[in-house]
Image (cartoon, rainbow, N blue to C red):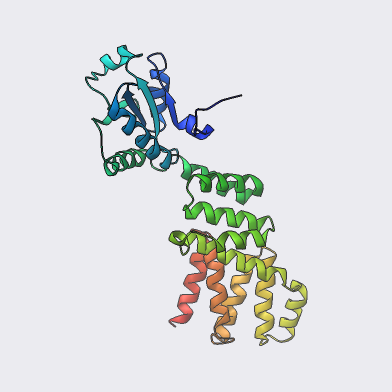
Amino acid sequence: MLEFGTGQTAADADLITDGTEQTFMAQVIEASQEVPVIVDFWAPWCGPCKTLGPALEAEVRAAGGKVRMVKINVDENQGIAAQLRVQSIPTVYAFYQGQPVDGFQGAQPPSALKEFVGKLAGLAGDGGLGAAMDEAESMLEQGAVSDAAQVFAAVLGQEGENARALGGLARAQIKAGNLDQAEALLANAPEVIRTAAEVEAARAALALARQAENAGPVDELRARLEADPSDHQARFDLAQALHATGQVEAAIDELLELFRRDREWNDGAAKTQLFTIFDALNPKDPLVARGRRKLSSMIFA
């Protein structure tokens, strides 16, 4: 069983480790090919080290995996300290892609440490979170809903205010039929991302899923509409039923036809429903561009 020091979690053990001359190549040079690695040269007798070390560790943890830290005791590893010309401690170096990219000596105020770690975190972008969410989106499209949800949840665990992760997790819950869980997740979205596009898209998807619960049979609604093409409610209900069965393009077409016939019907319900569908779709989906273009041509005709 792995054991960690007092107050240290398993995640911390991956982010913050003790290094030696023998492990320097693997822990620092090789590891920095993936994310920036901060090397803290310290010693037990160094007073400023006792203040700097914990403060720097806190900033590394706050970076959520975008930066790692290796602590090297210079008394026990004099060779590597001499090789890197460490003349006084505390000395801190930062490596990225195998090369030193920044560093400082002596105690630093909290604001300077935050800026130091923040700049390093920016070097590696999002630490691979974006790629992970791209993969989760592919999983969602392919029907691997549970796997996608796990990835989005993991990202959200690292970045609680990640709008794409929260929206993705909500959409995964919706696809799994867990509408109440999705609604709770969206209702408790952090204020800073509450109106983000990804979160609004999930809300739109949730609204459509709620409608689908009460959608009527497509064949019956189509028959009603064929019997009376001016039955706007039947056309609107048909669009909802089509969308509920995955016929998104057909649903958009029926709503566009309803808007063409009577744009003011039911307080502009056709236009409102169209925007809900557009918001729920991927912005790059061709259906969005086509639908918006047709709607705009009718609005400004």
Tell which residue pokes out farthest to the top in this image. 79
Residue 123 vs 164, above or below: the answer is: above
Residue 256 lies in what quarter of the image?
Answer: bottom right
Q: Residue at x 43, y 81 (%)?
A: 300
Residue 92 vs 59, above or below: the answer is: above
Foreground residue, 125 or 186?
Answer: 186
* Relative horizontal placement of residue 37, taking residue 104 as reference (left or right): right
Q: Residue at x 23, y 22 (%)?
A: 88
Foreground residue, 145 or 152?
Answer: 152
* Relative horizontal placement of residue 26, taking residue 271 as reference (left or right): left
Please tell me how many numbered marks the rendered image carries: 0
> Which image quarter is the N terminus in?
top right
Residue 10 in sight: yes
Foreground residue, 245 or 215?
Answer: 215
Residue 78 vs 9, above or below: the answer is: above
Q: Residue at x 59, y 57 (%)?
A: 170
